């Protein structure tokens, strides 16, 4: 499958999810604006004040991320593949009487944005929708000012490799870490996979290693807690004990030389 085919498939999928008011296409609530940074920056990585900071919310349409950062005083640009998701941002911005710039585009091609334009790039879970994260990180590094922050969250590879429901032997690893084709489309709504979308497994060599090779220094990592030892077997909270779903990364832009990395996707397994 060509990257452009996956892009168009996921654009259509997210348009549908937005129209269906999927849980990830729910605009910010009124209470989110009371203390906006607290509602999106649990670790406190952004500090107490981002007033006047230029913030790119990348692949972050849906009426939540952009408006909340704008409410915190940032100058916000939202880039998203789905025009329907971006429309939710504009609806919330109008209601809250704030200005947000929205741009339809893919996370791996930010050619519409200038070099060293942003102080902060916020990137919610979405790298799973592209087959190659290298151009994504290259673009993030390009549009960030030196010393700027890149806050991103990703689906952990083990979660995408693991069965959604337990069998007789518990949850099982169903796919290789080197699986390069898109995963079968999920047809049911669940908290691990977004229905109708094409998703790709990315090993940590790419998720984290390629981030570093692009000139982004990792300063901190957290794993948002969704596990619950008391949860009923088969629930998202129960599964999360065995296959943590997400990893959240704080990185900073530094100067770097050219990337000479050769993709290990060229490795042929026996």
Image (cartoon, rainbow, N blue to C red):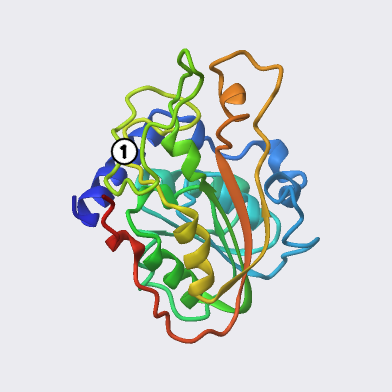
Q: Is residue 91 visible?
A: no
Residue at image point 49% right, 51% down: 60
**Vertically, is 34 above or below 236?**
below
Residue 255, position as x, y percentages in the image: 56, 85
- Describe the element under mark 1 as helix, strand or loop: loop
Q: Residue at x 77, y 47 (%)?
A: 35
**266 sits to left or right of 237:** left
Q: Nearer the viewer, residue 264 or 189?
A: 264
List x then y, in percent, for residue 63: 52, 44
Residue nearest the viewer, comparing 154 with 101:
154
Q: Residue 135's spot in the image, x, y percent?
A: 37, 67
Q: Relative to 167, say whether 174 is above or below.
A: below
Q: Residue at x 40, y 46 (%)?
A: 177
Q: Which residue is mark 1?
A: 183
Location of residue 107 (image quadrant): bottom left
User: Which residue of the protein is positioned furthest toward the front in this rendering?
Assistant: 270
**Residue 270 percent location from the top left of the image:** 26, 50
Up the image or down, 93 lies above or below 22; here it is below
- Specify whether residue 241 is in view: yes
């Amino acid at each position: 499958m060509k990257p452009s085919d996956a892009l168009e498939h996921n654009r259509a999928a997210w348009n549908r999810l937005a129209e269906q008011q999927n849980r990830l296409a729910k605009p910010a609530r009124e209470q989110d604006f009371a203390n906006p940074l607290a509602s999106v920056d649990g670790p406190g990585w952004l500090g107490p004040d981002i007033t006047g900071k230029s913030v790119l919310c990348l692949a972050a349409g849906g009426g939540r991320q952009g408006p909340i950062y704008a409410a915190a005083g940032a100058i916000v640009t939202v880039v998203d593949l789905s025009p329907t998701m971006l429309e939710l941002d504009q609806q919330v911005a109008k209601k809250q009487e704030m200005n947000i710039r929205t741009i339809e585009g893919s996370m791996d091609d930010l050619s519409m944005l200038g070099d060293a334009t942003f102080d902060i790039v916020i990137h919610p879970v979405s790298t799973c929708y592209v087959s190659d994260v290298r151009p994504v990180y290259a673009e993030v590094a390009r549009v960030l000012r030196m010393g700027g922050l890149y806050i991103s969250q990703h689906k952990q590879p083990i979660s995408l490799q693991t069965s959604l429901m337990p069998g007789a032997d518990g949850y099982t690893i169903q796919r290789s870490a080197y699986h390069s084709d898109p995963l079968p489309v999920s047809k049911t709504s669940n908290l691990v996979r977004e229905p109708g979308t094409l998703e790709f497994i990315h090993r940590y060599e790419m998720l984290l290693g390629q981030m570093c090779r692009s000139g982004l220094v990792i300063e901190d990592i957290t794993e948002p807690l969704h596990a619950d030892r008391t949860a009923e077997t088969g629930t998202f909270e129960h599964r999360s004990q065995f296959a943590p779903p997400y990893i959240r990364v704080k990185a900073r832009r530094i100067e770097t030389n050219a990337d000479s990395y050769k993709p290990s996707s060229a490795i042929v397994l026996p």
